[in-house]
């Protein structure tokens, strides 16, 4: 009877329930009532499906770092408002379609913070995509050549959270500027975006170029955005000193 039940669970892809049922059958110290057993099996299946969903979302995001909010360094020299960052754990900024702009010099932890917020979003079931900004533009140029551009842009537009890292390392040419404008325009008021950059926001206008387009992009990006400017020494240098 139990063997048949387990096989049916496998065929129905109730993997969490199957493992929990196996565990219960193998243990001699667990005595559930019928109601408790059903609740336990259902909770096990629920947890398993949630964990697999989080794993899929995290894999699809292609983060640069395996980062968690709990590991963010709030040392006083970094001038990070801990309360502000911890409020992002609820991901209400995604519900509210708000942007986060993270700036700071090389190695201070911008990418890690952006990735940590992204991982948190995945854990809450949001669809996230992480890109190095220059590599994204290169990918879009390639997609123009093989007629997959519309598909790529639509995919980006549908993400609950888009993370653009290392923005501003290179000035935008006319093609990349138009790509950037289209991405920001598509997401404005509809989805949340995080941008991490070594350059202060005041310098972004020059990096984008073409005053009219730069004005339009920054108006959509910066208005009501959460801004984080990380100070202090490079975290990578600190780690090297410790070793």
Image (spheres, grey):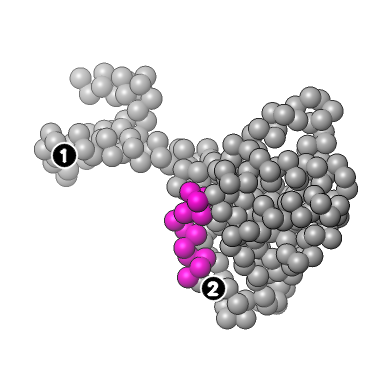
In this orientation, does residue 161 appear? no
Residue 22: image location, x then y, percent: 28, 33
Q: What SS does tag 2 mark?
A: loop
State the residue at coordinates (22%, 23%): 2
Q: Which residue is mark 1?
A: 36
Q: Is residue 235 above or below residue 115?
A: below
Taking depth in this image into account, of 141 and 135 the one nearest to the observer is 141
Look at the image and give the residue range highlighted in magenta.
83-96
Q: What is the CA distance from the residue labelled 2 to the residue labelled 1?
A: 44 Å
Q: Considering only order in the chain, which callout, 1 or 2, is on the residue closer to the N terminus?
A: 1
State the residue at coordinates (65%, 63%): 102
Quarter residue 207 falls in: bottom right
State the residue at coordinates (11%, 38%): 33
Q: Which residue is mark 2?
A: 81
Taking depth in this image into account, of 79 and 234 the one nearest to the observer is 79
- The outermost residue toward the front is 212
């Amino acid at each position: 009877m139990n063997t048949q039940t387990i096989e049916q669970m496998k065929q129905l892809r109730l993997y969490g329930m199957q493992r929990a049922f196996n565990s219960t059958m193998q243990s001699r110290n667990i005595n559930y009532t019928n109601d408790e057993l059903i609740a336990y099996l259902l909770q096990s299946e629920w947890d398993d499906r949630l964990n697999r969903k989080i794993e899929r979302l995290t894999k699809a995001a292609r983060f640069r770092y395996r980062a968690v909010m709990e590991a963010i360094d709030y040392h006083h020299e970094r001038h990070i408002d801990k309360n502000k960052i911890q409020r992002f754990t609820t991901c209400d900024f995604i519900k509210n379609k708000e942007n986060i702009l993270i700036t700071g010099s090389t190695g201070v932890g911008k990418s890690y913070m952006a990735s940590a917020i992204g991982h948190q979003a995945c854990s809450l079931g949001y669809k996230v995509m992480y890109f190095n900004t220059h590599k994204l533009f290169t990918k879009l140029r390639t997609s123009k050549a093989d007629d997959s551009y519309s598909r790529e842009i639509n995919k980006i537009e549908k993400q609950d959270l888009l993370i653009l890292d290392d923005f501003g390392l290179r000035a935008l040419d006319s093609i990349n500027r138009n790509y950037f404008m289209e991405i920001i325009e598509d997401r404005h008021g509809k989805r949340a975006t995080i941008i991490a950059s070594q350059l202060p926001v005041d310098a972004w206008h020059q990096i984008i170029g073409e005053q009219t387009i730069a004005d339009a992009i920054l108006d959509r990006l910066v208005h009501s955005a959460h801004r984080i400017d990380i100070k202090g020494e490079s975290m990578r240098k600190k780690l090297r000193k410790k070793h």
